Amino acid sequence: MEYFATSVGFEKVEKVYLSAAISVFYYPLLHYLREQIGSISEYFDPFAGKPFPVKSGLSSLAERASLIPAIGLALSDSKHTPNAIFTYAQKKQELIRKRINRGVFSTFAAALAVCLVIMALQVSEARQLGVQKGKLEKELLLLGPKLSKDKIAEMAKEMKIRNQHNQRYSQKYKGLALISELSFLTPDDIRLTQVRMSIPEPGAGGQTTGAAGKEAAPKENLVLQGVVLGSRGAMDAQLAQYVMKLENSPMLQGVVLQKSSVAKFRNSEILQFVINAKIG
């Protein structure tokens, strides 16, 4: 107590409770405690102020004080007071067990939080995809009715009929278009004396059957006869340029200069020619 008062607590001990039985307590030690405290020591009576019947056997202070260890063990707490039943080794094991449980719970809580975040992101992404799908479906409805096999077949039939009509009109006015093309391509120094076009009438049964049994389209030919005017040295060049223009025309194919010869006309020389071509 002197060490506590001078080195540790720096306070004087005023009271000491004795929890041992009076019959076994060492009286010289009790006398020393009384001298150190400077006051009269008291025995700890857990039942002070409470009357007991005579038959209970607890009428004397010594008998009541003998119950102090049992009462202490009964009222002891594992967190604060010493406990003879729950030792320090068991406390250490319990502390380790609690720490492990807290770590497992913390890990589980962190994993649950990550899962919730991922789930929220997936729900948000699914909602955005749903909105985008709705917009695309509305745009698809605005484009027109849905296509089916029957609808495609009907459209193909209509296109075929329209193509046949276009071919008939093209066949009907092909001669007029060819004459317009020739008038555009023929220069002033070249005069066409004869134009023969072999174009079948639209809708005519002019198709022939080949050796393999397939129907062949009738041939459309063009024969041009004319003369080239000008100087003798430039006639061949002018005719060659004219043939090249005909070859570059989209309406003619297989342009061939079949014949060219020089002839006399009114005391001057002219270049006569015959050109064959296929229409198409």
Image (cartoon, grey):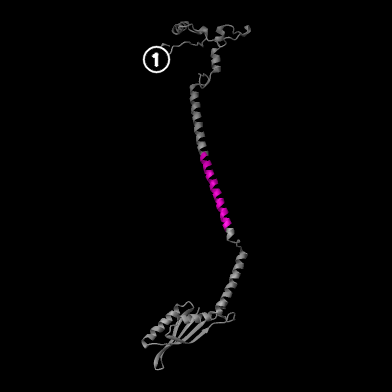
Task: Pick whichever, 255 or 76, lies toward us.
Answer: 255
Residue at the outermost left position? 233
Whether 118 is among the magenta residues is yes
- Measuring from the top left, give residue 130's x and y in whole percent: 57, 51
Establish if 117 lies above or below 175: above
Q: Residues within 10 Å of mark 1 (few under 14, many from 20)?
A: few
Q: How many marks?
A: 1
Q: Residue at x 52, y 39 (%)?
A: 113
Tag 1 residue:
7
Establish if 18 lies above or below 254: above
- Magenta-highlighted stretch: main secondary structure? helix
Q: Which residues are magenta?
A: 113-139
Give the amino acid type for the residue marked by disc 1 in the picture: Ser
Q: Is residue 103 visible?
A: yes
Task: Pick whichever, 16 or 77, lies toward us.
Answer: 16
- Measuring from the top left, give residue 144's x and y in whole percent: 59, 61
Q: Is residue 214 visible?
A: no
- Measuring from the top left, give residue 36's x and y in whole percent: 44, 8
Instruction: Say which element carries label 1.
Output: helix
Task: Pick whichever, 111 or 162, lies toward us.
Answer: 162
Q: From the viewer's perspective, is 59 left or right of 195? A: right
Q: From the viewer's perspective, is 158 left or right of 108? A: right
Quadrant hosting residue 205: bottom right
Establish if 86 lies above or below 241: above
Q: Residue at x 48, y 28 (%)?
A: 96
